[in-house]
Image (cartoon, rainbow, N blue to C red):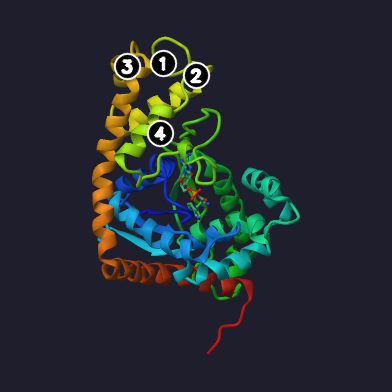
Amino acid sequence: RQRVLSGVQPTGSLHLGNYLGAIRNWVKLQEEYDTFFCVVDLHAITLPHEPKELLHSTHSSAALYIACGIDPAKASIFVQSHVPAHAELTWLLSCITPIGWLRKMIQFKEKSKKAGAEEVGTGLLTYPVLMAADILLYQTDLVPVGEDQRQHLELARDVAERANYLFGGKKAKKMGCRHTRLLKVPEALIPPAGARVMSLQDGASKMSKSAESDLSRINLLDPPDLIAQKIKRAKTDAFDGLEWDNPERPEAKNLLTIYQCVSGMTRDEVLAEVSSMRWGDFKPRLTDALIAHLEPIQARYAEVMQDEGALDAILAQGADAANAQANATLDNVRKAMGFSVPL
Ligand code: TYM
């Protein structure tokens, strides 16, 4: 079976962008693929963090994966830092990744500008190598992510090709490697709708965990009255009716997309239903659809969080499966690169 891997950073709470761009699509994939879903806690410390929050957020994110429909009987759910191979492969790969590749990353440019380029931790720059290691350790075929990760995925592909070129093939054979193609070159899987959910307060910027105002995003655990309030206050425009593709109406496109995704309708069905509506008619409908969609997820989340022992057992089982696969890849790469094997 082909393999799928993806992950979300446990920074704050997960939001609708994470769900529509990523997690929702993982659920379908677990039926047909060999799937690994990781809570990428090592990624969550590239900017200053609060240890207690990281710990809570890690458990909470894993519980949300399950609440959203990831089934531990079908998929391996694990915490990145429980699999030491991620950190080790990152070092090996970072030594063959040109620093210029990393400086070009849009996310690095944006985040380091905000924090002051000389002040930010080195990890903010090398972060995409850690992401490449996450993916490449599992010989992953497909990586279901939102649009904002496309560039990082490209980098992971480039790093895999470079490692294969430098140490794979005949050279790996000479080193006695079992697999001469060291790392599989993965493909991104980006959904047709929901790949880029925008801020509720500005249709031109992405919904994100780091945006200052909580009104800009719907968190998966927001209670119904808060969701209603956020949609009520969401930015709109002065046009009549609603439409999909007017470039002057990014907010309309965004809210229609959210409606489409949570209601399960097609674009045309949404258009037929709402094209003649005013914002004042549409917003309550969107609110109801969102609340109806998130309610069962929130109920399931509460159940999962009640039994921390069971959640820990799921994560331990996931880490066992992940360690087995990750160590096989790492051992092969170590051998190819000429590292001695300890007794
Ligand atoms: P992160 O934690 O920022 O986001 C997790 C997933 O959610 C998607 N996403 C969005 N999709 C649509 N609209 C949005 N507004 C939105 N915001 C976020 C992201 O595209 C992502 O799929 N580096 C990654 C995490 C990562 C990873 C990996 C992913 C680490 N290792 C290996 C896949 C494979 C990140 O920071 O995502």
Quarter location, residue 166:
bottom right
Nearest to the eye among marks 3 and 4: give it.
4
Which of 213 and 94 lies nearest the eye of the viewer?
A: 213
Mark 3 → mark 4, Cα distance in angstroms: 20 Å
**Visible residue check, residue 310:** yes
Mark 3 → mark 1, Cα distance in angstroms: 8 Å
Quarter location, residue 325:
bottom left
Q: Amino acid at mark 4?
A: Lys
Q: Position of residue 100 (x, y in %)?
A: 73, 51
Q: Position of residue 251 (x, y in %)?
A: 47, 24
Nearest to the eye among marks 4 and 1: give it.
4
Which of 273 and 340 lies nearest the eye of the viewer?
A: 273
Q: Which mark is residue 249?
A: 2
Whether the residue carrying mark 1 lies under 8 Å from ligand 1 is answered with no
Check whether the beta carbons of the residues at disc 2 and disc 1 lie within 8 A of each other.
yes
Other residues around mark 1 within 10 Å, as few (<14) / some (14–19) / many (≥20): some
Helix, strand or loop for disc 2: loop
Helix, strand or loop for disc 4: helix
Other residues around mark 4 within 10 Å, as few (<14) / some (14–19) / many (≥20): many
Mark 2 → mark 1, Cα distance in angstroms: 8 Å
Which callout, 4 or 2, points at the residue further toward the start of the chain?
4
Which callout, 4 or 1, points at the residue further toward the start of the chain?
4
Check whether the beta carbons of the residues at disc 2 and disc 3 lie within 8 A of each other.
no
Determine which residue is flagged by label 3: 274
Q: Amino acid at mark 2?
A: Arg
Q: Amino acid at mark 1?
A: Glu
Which callout, 2 or 1, points at the residue further toward the start of the chain?
1
